[in-house]
Amino acid sequence: MPEVTAFAPGHPSWAELASPDPEGSRRFYRGLFGWYSYTLTVGDLGDYEVFTLGGVKGPEVAGMQALADDSETASWTCYFRTDDIPATLAAVRDAGGLETVEPTDIANLGRMALCSDPEGADFALWYPYDLKGAGVVDEPSAMVWVELAARDIERARRFYGEVFGWRAVDRDYYDSVYTHWKVGDWAVAGMVSMDEHWPPGHPSHWTPFFWVSDCDESAALAVELGARVRIPPTDIKPCRFCVVTDPTGARLGLVTPTTDVLAERGRP
């Protein structure tokens, strides 16, 4: 796909890693995806790492910041584009969610706010200034999908429908129900039900998925680099995928598409 020039409201636009070991995370993701990176100093927020493809001056693919303290856990956060952060936050609260970090300017990059849905799954809102979001998506080593794992899927459907205007469409990828959320005809995200196969007490969460040329080889490479496989390489209709936790414990997915990604999601 050509480099992205803009994201429409309600679409995933960025993924950000919170790491207790930024240097170790740099080594892992550079080794796994071939990413480069550069560091920005963002005022009182400290250093912010921007991962890129094709060299330091290549398109941006994701961000990283250090965890504030040892009580927090490593994680990836999925960002969704909004034209009006206060209005979207009001919709989050009205629908039963929480505002966990108030709107904050990230230097000249954009304005963000952190939220959680009624089951506690964290996600972020993004209003761009100079950084529209990822400079490239839907190609190798870039983000291709975001997915929510939720225990109460009907509650999640109501919440995200009210907040982003998403329309839920059921698909037959798994033995259990899988949901595509759509804006118009374009599938922007997915949802899987956390059934009895999930560990008791495992929290609801969002996971970013990144395109790899060979899911099995990339899963093996991730393990060599210190990751753990949580869902082994598995075939479903549009792809072969797996889920791993990186050396710090942050969860991410690896995907090798077996169909036309844009056609599968509903080419705009």
Image (cartoon, rainbow, N blue to C red):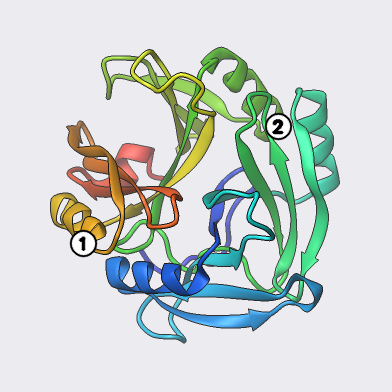
For discs 1 and 2, the disc positioned in front in the rendered view = 1
Q: Residue at x 31, y 54 (%)?
A: 227
- For the residues labelled 1 and 2, the Cα–Cα distance comes to 40 Å
Q: Quadrant of residue 265?
A: top left
How many other residues sit within 10 Å of disc 2, few (<14), some (14-19) or many (≥20)?
many
Instruction: Identify residue type, mark 2.
Output: Val
Q: Residue at x 29, y 66 (%)?
A: 32
- Tag 2 secondary structure: helix
Q: Residue at x 40, y 22 (%)?
A: 199
Give the quarter of the figure containing the N terminus: bottom left
Looking at the picture, does residue 38 appear above or below residue 240? below
Looking at the picture, does residue 162 appear above or below residue 154? below
Residue that mark 1 sits on: 224
Q: Position of residue 129 (x, y in %)?
A: 72, 69
Residue that mark 2 sits on: 163
- Tag 1 secondary structure: helix
Q: Is residue 222 left or right of residue 266?
A: left
How many other residues sit within 10 Å of disc 1, few (<14), some (14-19) or many (≥20)?
few
Q: Position of residue 25 (x, y in %)?
A: 44, 67
Give the quarter of the figure containing the C terminus: top left
Q: In this orientation, which residue lies closer to the viewer: 253 or 230?
A: 230
Looking at the picture, does residue 100 appear above or below residue 136? above
Q: Position of residue 44 (x, y in %)?
A: 81, 74
Instruction: Identify residue type, mark 1.
Output: Glu
Q: Residue furthest front?
A: 70
Looking at the picture, does residue 137 appear above or below residue 170? below
Q: Quadrant of residue 212?
A: bottom left
Q: Is residue 108 left or right of residue 121?
A: right
